[in-house]
Amino acid sequence: MFTEIDDGVFSHSDGFVVNLHSPIEAVYFEGQHSAKIYKEPGVGGHVYYFEPPIKWEPPFEGETLSEDKQQIIRNRVIAALRFRGLPFHM
């Protein structure tokens, strides 16, 4: 279950946080790890770029994310967008 902990920042009971506040990116946090999903304004909502592959930000950029883990991150960011009721495109 999501809880909005700040404007556009959502914490989930599964232990991750999604920050949708920035105009250029969504940031996914899991423990000390973070990953950025870039976005830009589009007609009817932002366009989110889940490709190229999602990667951890420094200092964890050397850790490889499996396809399964990337899909989990995508699904969690999408769930946060839906929870907030934001229109989006991929």
Image (tube, grey):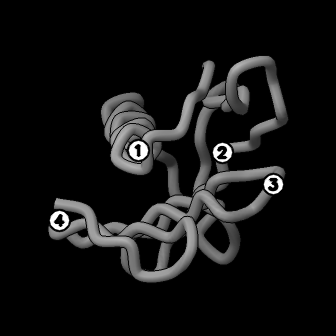
Regarding residue 11, the answer to whether it shows in the image is yes
The reply to whether discs 1 and 2 touch (Cβ–Cβ < 8 Å) is: yes
Picture quadrant of residue 1: bottom left
Q: Secondary structure at mark 3?
A: loop
The reply to whether discs 1 and 3 touch (Cβ–Cβ < 8 Å) is: no
The reply to whether discs 3 and 4 touch (Cβ–Cβ < 8 Å) is: no
| Label whose residue precedes the other's in the sequence (3 or 4) | 4
- For mark 3, what is the residue? 23
Q: Which amino acid, by three-letter code, is at mark 2?
A: Ile
**Which residue occupies the foreground of this view, 72 or 40?**
40
Q: Secondary structure at mark 1?
A: helix
- For mark 4, what is the residue? 14
**Alpha-carbon distance for marks 3 and 4?**
26 Å
**Alpha-carbon distance for marks 4 and 2?**
20 Å
- For mark 1, what is the residue? 73
Q: Which amino acid, by three-letter code, is at mark 1?
A: Ile
| Label whose residue precedes the other's in the sequence (1 or 3) | 3
Q: Which mark is residue 37?
A: 2
| Label whose residue precedes the other's in the sequence (3 or 2) | 3
**Alpha-carbon distance for marks 1 and 3?**
19 Å
**Which residue occupies the foreground of this view, 76 or 89?**
89
